[in-house]
């Protein structure tokens, strides 16, 4: 199985809203815990180390790039 980076949702905005709503009314620490739990649950659902490895690398690159862009804007 290859990593899919295109939306697989019939309603991508609805999926985004679900994630945002899950964080409403909880502390920053609880929000971080929720994110970690969600990552582990979805990683288990994927069940493919190669896909997981690719997803982690992609997410890492995006975070580093965003941080670099923010530093350049300052």
Image: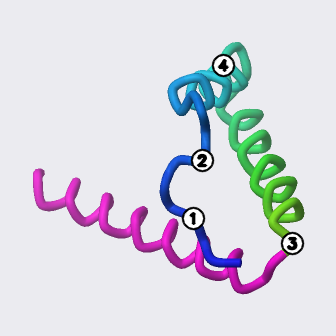
Contact between marks 4 and 2 (CB within 8 A): the answer is no
- State the separation of the CA atoms marked 1 and 3: 14 Å
**Residue at the image point whose x is 60% and y is 72% from the top:** 3
The mark that comes first in sequence, 3 or 2, is 2
Q: Quadrant of residue 1?
A: bottom right
Between 65 and 3, the one nearer to me in the picture? 3
**Residue placed under numbered mark 4 in the picture:** 21
- In front: mark 4 or mark 1? 1
Figure check: 28 above or below 59: above
**Residue placed under numbered mark 3 in the picture:** 47
The spot of residue 23 in percent (x, y) is: 68, 25
Task: Look at the image and say whether residue 64 sits in the magenta stretch.
Answer: yes
Query: Regarding mark 1 in the picture, which secondary structure is present there?
Result: loop
Q: Quadrant of residue 15?
A: top right
- In front: mark 4 or mark 2? 2
Mark 2: few/some/many CA within 10 Å (<14, 14-19, 20+): few
- State the separation of the CA atoms marked 4 and 1: 24 Å
**Residue placed under numbered mark 2 in the picture:** 8
**Residue placed under numbered mark 1 in the picture:** 4
Side of 66 relative to 49 (left or right): left
- State the separation of the CA atoms marked 4 and 2: 20 Å
Q: Return the residue found at the far front.
A: 10
């Amino acid at each position: 199985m290859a990593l899919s980076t295109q939306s697989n949702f019939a309603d991508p905005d609805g999926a985004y809203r679900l994630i945002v709503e899950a964080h409403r009314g909880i502390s920053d620490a609880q929000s971080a815990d929720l994110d970690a739990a969600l990552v582990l649950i979805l990683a288990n659902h994927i069940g493919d180390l190669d896909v997981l490895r690719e997803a982690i690398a992609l997410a890492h690159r995006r975070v580093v790039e965003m941080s670099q862009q923010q530093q350049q804007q300052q």
